[in-house]
Every structure is written in C-alpha cells, then in structure tokens.
Image: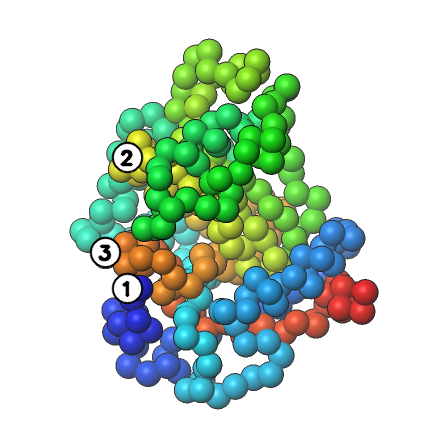
Amino acid sequence: MPISRAECMQAFGYEKLSQVPAAQITFPSGPSCREACKGRAANAPKELKNYAVFDNPVADDNYPLRRFAAAIRLADYPDYGAFCQYVKKFSNGERIRLVKRAQKNGYFVELCDLRTFSVDRMDIHQSKETRQGQPIRGVCVLPIEELGGVPTRYLEPKTPECENYWIVSFGVFLPETGHKQGDVTVDKRMVAYINLNRVGEYAFYGTILGHGAHLANGVMDLCHHHIVEMLLEKRAAWAANLRYIWYAGMEDGTPGLYQWKRRSGFKPHRFYARQRVSECAMAATRE
C-alpha cells in the first residue's frame, strides 16, 4: 500500500496541512520562447492536475488534493554542500554513501542525446520484469524504432534554445572501450538515465530508470545528486530562474519509492499555479 498523506505529514513533522510548504508556480515567457513553448505551457494543467490548484486560491486547510507534490526547493540550499548535509540526516547518510560508492566504482554522469544510446536503453528497460511492483509498461516496452532506432552516428546533446521550456537527459555511464550502439563506437555503456523536463519555474523528473544489475550500486542516487549539484552550483544560462525540482507525488508508488524520495531531499509541497500568467500560456490557451 502507498504511504498515506497522514503518514507523510507525520514523517516530516507537520501537524496540520497549513504547515506543508506552499509553492506558487508560474509559467513565464521570454524572448527565447518558441512555438513549442506554447504547447508545453498549455499542457501544464494536465501534468500538474493531481498536484496543484490552478487559478483559484483556496484556504490552506482546505487544500483538496489527496497527494502532495514531491519537490526540492532550490532556494532552501545555499550550495550543494548544504543539500548534502540535509540528506545526511536520513539513515546515517546512506544516500551520500551510495553516491560515493558509485563514483568509486567508475560510474559517471553526462548530458546526452538518448538517441545515441538506444541499444543500451533497450537493455535498461528490459533488465527487470517489474518496476515498482508492476509489470513493465510505457517506455519500457517500446521497440527500439520508437526510441530513435539503432544510431548511425554519435549525436551530441544540444543546449536548450529556450530558458523556460526544455527537456534534457542525463545518462549514467561506465567506461567500456569499444562498446557500440549498432555500428557506432561510443566507448561507454549507459546503465541509467533521467529525463529532466522544465516547464516555467519547475522541472520534473519524467523518465527515471536504471539497469536492474546496477541499481544497488547507487546509479540513480549519483544521477540525482549530479542534477542537484549542477542546479545549485554550476547552473547554465538555460537553467536560470528554475525554482523547483519535482518528482510526481510524495505518495506515488511503493513505500520504497517514497523512502527514496524522502532520503533524496524531496519534501511534500502544496503547489498553487496560475495557468494564464504569461503571453506564452495565454497564446496557447487562445489557440
């Protein structure tokens, strides 16, 4: 059974709903916004439908959702070291030890174009018969043709053109001289990846998957911490003004996933959002 909202509040020391942090989310536009941004802004209500109240404010104690958004507020931490100090409070720093173990064992994280690693992605997807206690589904059962096909050349990751709406991918790799994707030599093996999707002021974990044989080695912790460190200390121009990392609901999934989120720095939040706060979003609504 998933953890209940009451259990979640108790675990974080909240006695009443109004104590759960509230996040006012907006969807700004800017000079870098393109036509595709309109669709991303217009689709935000669908993405957030279970995790936010749109347009009409409600009293704190009447927050109507049965699930809290699992989010990291970046402004809570002056630097990556402060974030690690918070995470160390859980299980005597278990997650930090896993990150260090992964690094010691040679795993590393890079921005990547997932189309270059479609063969390894298939291997990751099919490495477990179940995910979160359920038979694999969604992206995990797609044929390689729908993952971009077997690559014919090495595709470098592209820098996002818009600072408000983008999708970037972080891969976890092991060095492996001569390793190939089809006929393309890449000299490294992808064993996990996270898609980070930015929509205005928040970015959410879309796909987050690791190879079954490598999960116990801390590969997902390494990837997650790499992303947090980048956003706290090495933030590129395309990640400017990003306020939250969001990973679905605090109560989504199994108790094991809940504990991973909690120990990885995610906290329950009440998301309040304004659907039509920017020219970009308004244009999408009109069209």
Residue type for callout 2: Asn
Determine the secondary structure under disc 1. loop
In the rendered view, would you say 180 is above or below 92? above
Q: Quadrant of residue 67?
A: bottom left
Bin the neighbour count of mark 1 within 10 Å (Cα to Cα): few under 14, some 14-19, many 20 and up.
few
The answer to whether marks 1 and 3 mark residues whose Cβ atoms lie closer than 8 Å is: no
Seen from this angle, which residue lies furthest left? 92
Which residue is found at the position 41% from the left and 20% from the top?
Answer: 175
Bin the neighbour count of mark 2 within 10 Å (Cα to Cα): few under 14, some 14-19, many 20 and up.
some
Q: Is residue 13 visible?
A: no
Residue type for callout 1: Met
For label 3, the residue is 90
Q: Which is more foreground, mark 2 or mark 1?
A: 1
Residue type for callout 3: Phe
Measured as percent of width and height from the top left, residue 183 is found at: 57, 13
Which residue is found at the position 64% from the left and 19% from the top?
Answer: 152
For label 2, the residue is 217
Q: Which is more foreground, mark 3 or mark 2?
A: 2
Label placed on residue 178: none
First of labels 2, 1 by sequence position: 1
Q: Is residue 246 visible?
A: yes
In the rendered view, would you say 67 is above or below 84? below
First of labels 1, 3 by sequence position: 1
Measured as percent of width and height from the top left, residue 248 is found at: 45, 60
Question: Taking 247 as reference, is 117 left or right?
Answer: right
